[in-house]
Image (tube, coloured by chain):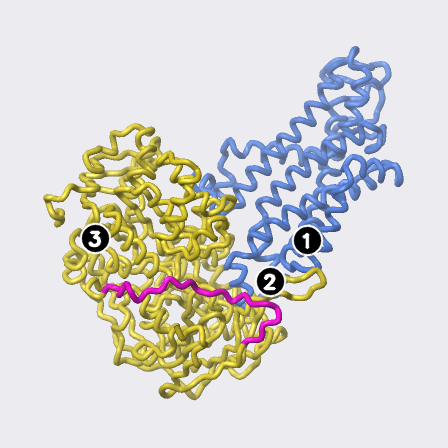
Chain colours: A yellow, B blue
Amino acid sequence: MSTSDPTARPGLSISGLNISFRNKDGWTSVVRNLGFDIAPGETVAIVGESGSGKSVTALSVLGLLPQQSTRIEGSIRLGDRELLSLSPKDLKALRGNAIAMIFQEPMTSLNPTMCIGEQIAESIIAHRGTSTAEAKAEAIRLMEKVHIPSAARRYGEYPHQFSGGMRQRVMIAIALACKPALLIADEPTTALDVTIQAQVLNLIKELQEEEGMAVLFITHDMGVVAEVADRMVVMYRGDVVEEGATTEIFANSRHPYTKALLSAVPQLGSMSGSNDPQPFDIYDINTGLADEASVLKSTVDMSQILLDVKDLTVRFPVQQTIFGKVTARVHAVENVSLTLARGETLAIVGESGSGKSTTGKLITGLLHPTAGTVEICGKPMRKDTRQSLSRSVQMIFQDPFSSLNPRLTVGRAITEPLRIHKIATEKERDDIAASLLTRVGLSPEIARRYPHEFSGGQRQRICVARTLALKPSVIIADEAVSALDVSVKAQVVNLLLELQQEMQLGFIFISHDMAVVERISHRVAVMYLGEIVEIGPRAAIFSNPVHPYTRRLIEAVPVPDPSRRLDRHKISDSEIRSAVRPGDYVPPARTYREVSPGHLVQDADPEWAA
Amino acid sequence: MNGAFLKFTPRQIPAYLLALLLVVSLLAPLLPLQDPLKMDTAARFAGPSGAHLFGQDEFGRDILVRLIFAIRNSLIVAFAAAILAGVIGTALGVLAGYSRGLTEMLAMRFIDIVLCFPPLLLAMLAVTLYGPGPVTLIPVLAIVFVPSFTRVAHASVLSVRSQDYVEAVRSMGASNARVMFSTILPNIAGPLIVQFSFTVAVTVVLESGLSFLGLGVLPPAPSLGLMIGTGRATLAQAPMLLVWPCAALTAMILILNAFCDDLRDRLDPKSSKIRGQ
């Protein structure tokens, strides 16, 4: 099955791996007949959606699955050692020494009470038995190696003083402390912003070249796979459905599931030449046949302005003297102005801390602005009008697991808005719930069940149904598809587009995912540190990004095409700056220039000159 | 759902026992029982007989009847105090946790002040000032237990209010009262119900303790604490006089705790224990 050079001594070799978990009804098989090799210096990616068994495979290599309730058969060899027959003590010695792992969540995988440098040094001492002074010197060397700026100074800082991307670098430094033969990276960049993701991927590749280690990369993101992997293994519900060289699979996938997965991945730049959104083709996972998406008619009606936001500003005090004088503020949203027409989708893109979600909350009236106005269908949003205006603006949240009240049945959850606004009788509400569920592609029967019985995609459909109950004219979707698996993401995006066609809804689509944004939006606003740096028609923004930040953002998006890998020399190690400013900070007056009709760009700050 | 409630399982035993306790103590005055205060000095310390199943006490009163009325008194005081404390404490806690700012500061500092007093001391102080009896006892016990409800409610609200579904109902235009009482309250009911169970159990103990010291229910009205107090004096002659009220007290607390434990599981829609059956 392997396409690697047969003369190379395999770093990791897995064959005939079967993993089952015990539950109350007996054994459930979660991984079946898995086999692949990774040579030293090679990167293999295991790709799959949630429940495919990819993380379980990684844990089995490390021997971290609970022994009592797991059955592992087959063979996992590192060099010439069989890992499955090792004693727990030998395995422990192997972990961290020969095999290291980095995890998805850099926020929680470091000890918050220990300074960064000591955590790296501790791992060096534990595995190499060096003296404390030597370990410290080595730790600083490693911090420099993972490009942590002014490493010697930051040695004594604590995890909360590091950003997410920097923490992931620390995790990598710890993993590298013992020069492992195999590095397992389990979704290492999923929680990071795109520009930071590009930096971390770049770092892993660079270190791999230096150290010659084998890398097992676990991810659901086809863009990341195309970026880093030499070969890939596609898993679906515990089975390997396809395996081979990355370039070959991307160019010529054979299995229907791989085809479906690849087609669901939005490709940045695939939409040039068209001004309207375009739904995803939905492939059948069993047959691989495409259900071709229909071409949409234009829904935008510029004569009806649904939403008019002028000079919106909100600042939160973060630090005060004892006499109540504010010494530091977050300038979360600064002078944001935008409009939304009927049937239009305006995407707000930006990275964490850019103020995009705060803007969404200001529009719905969940937060009150420090200055500026929000007008919905010509009526100003104020404290006293929020209740009545909330019928026109509804919101979809990112996490479908926390945005539904666990104590309400699905039917009640959907009709909750009607109950709040005292619309319709109980009987009519049941009918409305049933028709809304049918509308979002769910069975009306589920109205009597509770949210926890449903998957993420189904829950997000329920949330969409809930927002439709009041027949709003504007829907704010705050990262509404970010937490979903690719194929489910495509379906929910299509649903939103269909609803727009039908009801001429206006969407504010808040997202960090440039590829989805390109697919769904008419216009795009790019936010950076609370300000809009560029706004304009989608085609103009993507084909002719003018502001340096927009360019950096678009360049950093991993393209699901192995032949177009990121130019590694272009990636800077700069961090996303913080919007916390001193108390007496006066934001500079910004000027915008019009590049083309409707395409406005902020005149770049001197910080971008470099 | 109803079917699950009717089907008998061992987990429901505490519920049935509590129901029995409540029915018997509520209906006690209507049942064909003897007068708990009727003395029969000729039959002091008489052992169990057909007419007096548990025997008679130092004044020849029927022990079983006195136990039933004592449990009735205990439960009335305990439930009244716990409900009062629960309503006030929860309202304060939800308000503090949801509105934050000055309201939160004032509410929580007030609670801290109440918490400074040891419960027994506070109860004794009030009883000394206003005289013993259930009318003093209920509000005093309620005040003693308000802080625990406020703290539990406050902490739970803080974790629930950051959930997206709270933000979601707010974005639908719900009023603050609606968010607090129809969205947040049901989601923090679990810990509050457990708190309620402990409060009822602790109140029963506290009430018995005060009655034992002569600061609670006044003789000749029956109370478990009073019965234990007098039973102690006659321990050598009639040990059962001490055993019966002690056993009743223990059993009552066990039943209350087991019941509330089960109730909490039942109220959680995610509980697989119930749906799995």
Chain under numbered label 2 = A
Residue A405's spot in the image, x, y percent?
Answer: 50, 56
In the displayed structure, does residue A407 sit left or right of residue A239?
right
Image quadrant holding the C terminus of chain B, namely: top left
* Label 1 SS: helix
At label 2, counting other C-alpha atoms closer than 10 Å, the crowd grade (few under 14, some 14-19, many 20 or more) is some
Which of A408 and A566 lies nearest the eye of the viewer?
A566
Tag 3 subunit: A
Q: Image point 25% across, 33% down: which residue? A: A84
Q: Which residue is mark 3?
A: A232
Magenta extent: A565-587
Q: Is residue A535 above or below residue B80?
A: below
- For residue A505, which numbered disc appears in the image? none
Task: Identify which amino acid the numbered label 1 is placed on.
Answer: Ala
| Tag of residue B91 | 1
| Chain of the residue under label 1 | B
Disc 2 and disc 3 in contact, CB within 8 angstroms: no
Instruction: Say the numbered circle drawn on residue A318.
Output: 2
Quote the CA–CA distance across marks 2 and 3.
46 Å
Above or below, A568 relative to A390: above
The residue positioned 39% from the left and 62% from the top of the image is A193
Nearer to me, A68 or B233: A68
Q: Tell me the kind of residue under disc 2.
A: Val
Q: Where residue B116 appears, x then y in whole percent?
A: 76, 42
Q: Amino acid at mark 3?
A: Met
Residue A77, quarter of picture: top left
